[in-house]
Image: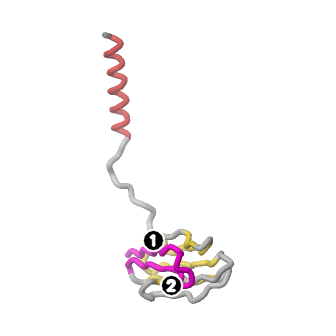
Amino acid sequence: MKKRIILSLIVLSGIALIYSCSSNTVKPGPAPAAAATVSVQNFAFVPDTVTIKAGGSITWTNKDTAPHTVTELSSAFDSGSLATNQTFNFTFNTAGTFKYHCLIHSMMKTAVVIVTN
């Protein structure tokens, strides 16, 4: 009987310890950057989601041997054709979500820029 009580206390102590170490609060993600870089490599935008502050800019660099474009879906920006190692820079002055893709390669996944105030 004594062993059962001790075992029960140990189990309850463990549960209490685990519960006290857990947190239900949402931890903030990284702060939006003032500038960011995106690589176009292996027919993908890396990273495929970037968050920056309004007034910040992004520089894309084509690291593939094939040409690519960085073209926003509603034409807010368009790099034109980028050759290997060529870059394109755009400054985002307005908050919002901007989806973009490569006009040359429709199979590439659409990427996103999130601009915050």
Where residue 29 appears, as percent x and y from the top left, is 42, 61
Where residue 41 appears, as percent x and y from the top left, is 62, 72
**Disc 2 marks which amino acid?**
Thr
* Occupied quadrant, residue 82: bottom right
What's the mark number on residue 71?
Answer: 2
Where residue 79 appears, as percent x and y from the top left, is 55, 87
Q: How is the image coloured?
A: secondary structure
Residue at the limit of the structure toward the top, as seen here: 1
Mark 1 or 2 closer to N-term? 1
In this image, 66 relative to 48: left or right?
A: right
Provide the secondary structure element on which disc 2 rests: strand
Disc 2 packing (10 Å; few <14; some 14–19; many ≥20): many
Name the residue located 33 percent from the left edge and 15 percent from the top edge.
4
Name the residue located 65 percent from the left edge and 80 percent from the top edge.
66
Disc 1 packing (10 Å; few <14; some 14–19; many ≥20): many
Tell me, yes or no, whether the highlighted magenta stretch contains residue 112: yes
Q: Name the residue beneath numbered marker 1.
A: 51
The residues tagged by marks 1 and 2 sit, at their Cα atoms, a distance apart of 17 Å
Name the residue located 38 percent from the left edge and 55 percent from the top edge.
27
**Disc 1 marks which amino acid?**
Thr
Query: Closest to the observer: 53 or 45?
Result: 45
Provide the secondary structure element on which disc 1 rests: strand
What's the mark number on residue 86?
Answer: none
Where residue 22 appears, as percent x and y from the top left, is 36, 42
In the rendered view of the protein, which quadrant contains the N terminus?
top left
| Residues in magenta, as a range | 95-117
Tell me, yes or no, whether the highlighted magenta stretch contains residue 109: yes
Comparing marks 1 and 2, which lies closer to the viewer?
A: 2
